């Protein structure tokens, strides 16, 4: 297999880059959503005739067959780590800073252990064994769980690197691409909405600085130490940060309609929803004329009583067929007749059906994008702050997880299905999401090929990328202005006092002289 892949890549290197390039995708996340989004880009490039090599863990239901796509599997990661992936990276109680520090450290440690595991896989060794004359024209890199592999970049000849961000805008992207996350923008995972008062902005700013410290003073240093052991080179934290400063641009899974307004630099390309194929129809389910409800929740965060409450409510809606994407629930709940359980339902296909009248979801970003695109009403039952943050941006109906029971949920569902204004807003949201000058996937492919044609994208970066924090945020100017406007009145006051004192002294002298003369 390795020799066949090598021959294909060597032959491809003789062809014009815009038509047939060798592209490496580093997609080390254990999240299925990340893999779906990253793979959509990879297959979009493959359809253009490029040869795409994907470095990925062995996630089921993600690996597909395409003549131009080659997989390098980081074997064993799913079996070892997937049972441990229970909490969201930013799922902490922000007012409790000690708890925030503890949970954040646990998640950084988890990412460190995963990356350490990858360094010892046969899959990574396969990539390291590539002959030096095999070149990749560009690397697409999802940084999650993979920063200990940054020395691959010089090992592969320092091709341009494009960062993939399936989870939308993240503070890390700002640090890498030369901008700063503003305190008035809630970071993903905090339970805040657009109403950012002073205390929220203050806590948000503290959290951002804490995350920066964790990444660059702890996590990245630990990853560089790992890399030095594996790659037998001496890389420093400065080398790692220089790698990041040379990244060409970022492809970000966001849509302006589903996010807060923000300034976006030229080296950040917004391509939210690129994984959605509008031509898909619901072909995997039967009874196509029956009204449907689709359910996809984080079932590991719901107890048996909550699951049964959801099932009982949905079972009472006997005019609907309910498709619930869930693993085996045998022994956990009593199954109503109108509910079908299956872990492998194709979510996009079901949501793409005109007969799907409601989507009950935890609020994952990709799920929300799909429902908004197809104009399906949403009831969100978020399990983490990140999901709550996604839901608040859309102002959609929510159900508190702790309050789940049959009566409460049925009232919510019937309220949505009978609310004409809500249904009309759903159609409006869909139209806004779809109204774009070009398809998100086409835009992503264009910018990847643009980088291959024109180099590393240095001409796209903002001037602030080469400034320190005080310069880019004009803190030095504000400090000078503060000093000026404080010192100027004080200086004037001082001179006025001196003038008065001098006049007083002069008057006293003249008075004394006059007395002596008299």
Image: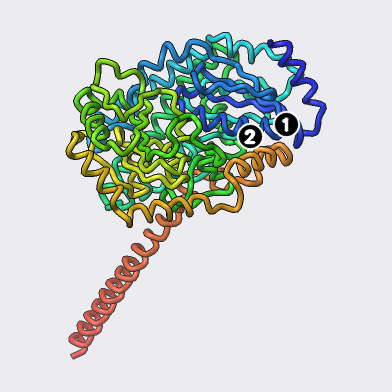
Disc ID at residue 236: none
Decide: few, some or many residues near mark 1? Use Cα within 10 Å; few <14, some 14-19, many ≥20: some
Quarter of the image where the C terminus is located: bottom left
For marks 1 and 2, give the CA distance: 9 Å
Taking the spot 33% from the left edge, 47% from the top edge, the residue there is 396
Q: Is residue 95 left or right of residue 370?
A: left
Task: Return the x and y of residue 340 as percentages of the image width and height.
Answer: 35, 26
Taking the spot 23% from the left edge, 24% from the top edge, the residue there is 303
Nearest the viewer among 50 and 341 is: 341
Q: Which residue is mark 2?
A: 44
Report whether residue 113 is seen. yes
Task: Return the x and y of residue 216 as percentages of the image width and height.
Answer: 45, 30
Report whether residue 209 is seen. no
Figure colour scheme = rainbow
The answer to whether the residues at label 1 and label 2 have Cβ atoms under 8 Å apart is: no
Nearest the viewer among 334 and 127 is: 334
Which residue lies most toward the bottom here?
518
Taking the spot 60% from the left edge, 53% from the top edge, the residue there is 437
Q: Which residue is mark 1?
A: 49
Nearest the viewer among 341 and 391 is: 341
Q: Is residue 6 left or right of residue 118?
A: right
Task: Return the x and y of residue 86 as percentages of the image width and height.
Answer: 33, 22
Q: Give the mark nearest the N terminus, 1 or 2.
A: 2
Task: Return the x and y of residue 338 as percentages of the image width and height.
Answer: 31, 30
Up the image or down, 95 lies above or below 60; here it is below
């Amino acid at each position: 297999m390795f020799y066949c892949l090598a021959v294909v890549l060597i032959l491809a290197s003789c062809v014009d880059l815009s038509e047939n390039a060798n592209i490496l995708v580093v997609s080390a996340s254990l999240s299925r959503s990340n893999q779906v989004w990253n793979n959509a880009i990879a297959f979009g490039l493959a359809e253009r005739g490029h040869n795409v090599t994907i470095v990925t863990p062995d996630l089921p239901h993600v690996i597909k067959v395409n003549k131009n796509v080659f997989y390098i599997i980081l074997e064993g990661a799913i079996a070892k780590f997937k049972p441990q992936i229970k909490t969201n990276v930013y799922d902490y109680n922000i007012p409790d800073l000690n708890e925030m520090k503890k949970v954040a450290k646990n998640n950084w440690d988890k990412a460190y252990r995963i990356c350490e595991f990858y360094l010892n896989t046969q899959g990574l060794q396969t990539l390291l064994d590539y002959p030096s004359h095999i070149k990749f024209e560009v690397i697409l890199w999802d940084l999650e769980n993979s920063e200990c592999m940054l020395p691959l970049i010089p090992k592969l000849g320092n091709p341009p690197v494009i960062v993939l961000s399936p989870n939308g805008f993240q503070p890390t992207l700002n640090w890498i691409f030369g901008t700063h996350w503003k305190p008035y923008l809630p970071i993903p995972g905090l339970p805040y909405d657009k109403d950012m008062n002073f205390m929220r902005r203050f806590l948000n700013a503290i959290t951002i600085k804490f995350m920066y410290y964790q990444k660059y003073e702890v996590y990245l240093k630990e990853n560089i130490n790992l890399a030095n052991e594996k790659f037998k080179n001496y890389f420093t934290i400065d080398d790692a940060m220089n790698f990041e400063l040379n990244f060409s641009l970022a492809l970000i899974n966001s849509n302006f309609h589903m996010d807060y307004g923000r300034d976006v630099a030229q080296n950040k390309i917004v391509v939210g929803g690129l994984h959605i194929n509008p031509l898909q129809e619901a072909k995997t389910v039967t009874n196509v004329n029956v009204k449907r409800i689709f359910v996809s929740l984080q079932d590991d965060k719901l107890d048996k009583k909550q699951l049964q409450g959801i099932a009982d409510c949905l079972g009472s809606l006997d005019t609907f067929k309910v498709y619930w994407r869930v693993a085996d629930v045998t022994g956990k709940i009593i199954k109503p007749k109108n509910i079908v359980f299956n872990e492998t339902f194709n979510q996009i296909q079901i949501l793409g059906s005109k007969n799907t009248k409601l989507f009950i979801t935890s609020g994952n970003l990709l799920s929300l994008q799909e429902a908004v695109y197809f104009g399906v009403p949403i009831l969100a039952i978020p399990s983490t702050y990140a999901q709550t943050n996604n839901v608040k941006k859309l102002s959609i109906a929510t159900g508190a997880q702790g309050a789940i029971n049959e009566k409460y949920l049925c009232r919510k569902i019937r309220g949505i299905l009978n609310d004409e204004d809500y249904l009309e807003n759903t159609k409006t949201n869909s139209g806004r999401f779809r109204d774009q000058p070009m398809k998100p996937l086409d835009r992503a492919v264009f910018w990847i090929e643009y980088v291959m044609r024109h180099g590393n994208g240095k001409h796209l970066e903002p001037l602030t990328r080469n400034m320190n924090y005080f310069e880019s945020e004009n803190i030095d100017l504000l400090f000078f202005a503060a000093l000026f406007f404080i010192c100027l009145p004080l200086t004037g006051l001082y001179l006025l006092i001196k003038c008065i004192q001098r006049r007083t002294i002069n008057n006293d002298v003249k008075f004394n002289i006059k007395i002596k003369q008299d």
